[in-house]
Image (cartoon, rainbow, N blue to C red):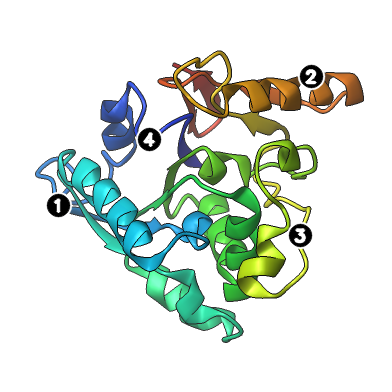
Amino acid sequence: MRMYLSSFRLGEHPDRLVALLGGVDGAGAGGVPIAVIANAIDDRPAEVRAACVGSEFVALRELGLRPTEVDLRTFFDRPPGEVAAALAGFPAVWVRGGNVFLLRHALARSGADGVLVDLLRRDAVVYGGYSAGACVLAPDLRGLERCDDADAVTEVYGRPVRWDGLGVLDHAVVPHVDSPDHPESALLAAVVADYRARGVPHRTLRDGQVLLVDGERTTVV
């Protein structure tokens, strides 16, 4: 299992993301395909959403990667094999931040949640992402409604919110902690306090930090 989980955007160690792709043909020369999942911002106006996706493309291209958006809305209520086929050609995915509850719904409704979990467990993909893209990997999402609007799922998709995470990690990830330049830092400090009070296992990340998983080794850099 290989994961690059950043607090905000690419963080301070994007070279480590490229290193995780080192065993993939073509990684050294650049141009490795990477699927971008941006459904955590499905609540934003179309033009704003497109601009945000474009900024992710710019950053990933600067690393020598070749990004393509895989919009999970295309696969809503379709057989899971369709999104599996769409993701099969990518050795890496990049899951953008935004609203973790929107992201969780889109992953479930498209079937991408099961596909990604399977790919990760078989070490068939490098999972990169930040903020909501890291948070969604936890066993449970309760507590994050202090920061992200859970009601957005009903407002955007007309469906009830899901509170379960993907369960890839055995703990929660709390981004933007001790990051005074980030507008959600205080809200996420409250999430940390809640997790501590309830005994919820978690790791905190300040902006710039990255949680790296490479096989059995997990480190924060």
Name the residue type under label 2: Ala
Image quadrant holding the C terminus, namely top left
- Graded by Cα atoms within 10 Å as few (under 14), some (14 to 19) or many (20 or more), the crowding at tag 1 reads some
Residue 202, above or below 68:
above
- Amino acid residing under circle 3: Arg
**Amino acid type assigned to the residue bearing label 4 in the image:** Arg
Look at mark 3 in the image and give the residue it sits on. 162
Which secondary structure lies at badge 2?
helix
Disc on the earlier residue, 3 or 4: 4
Work out how far the residue at label 3 is from the one at label 2, CA to CA, in angstroms. Answer: 22 Å
Which residue was labeled with disc 4? 9
Q: Report x, y in % for residue 152.
A: 66, 59
Report the residue marked by disc 2. Answer: 193
Amino acid bearing label 1: Gly
Residue displayed at 46% across by 59% down? 44
Badge 2 density bin: few <14, some 14–19, many ≥20, Cα 10 Å: few
What distance separates the C-alpha of mark 2 from that of mark 1? 42 Å
Real-space Cα distance between discs 3 and 1? 36 Å
Q: Which residue is mark 1?
A: 31
**Residue 182 x %, y %:** 48, 24
Indicate which disc, 3 or 1, sits on the residue closer to the N terminus: 1
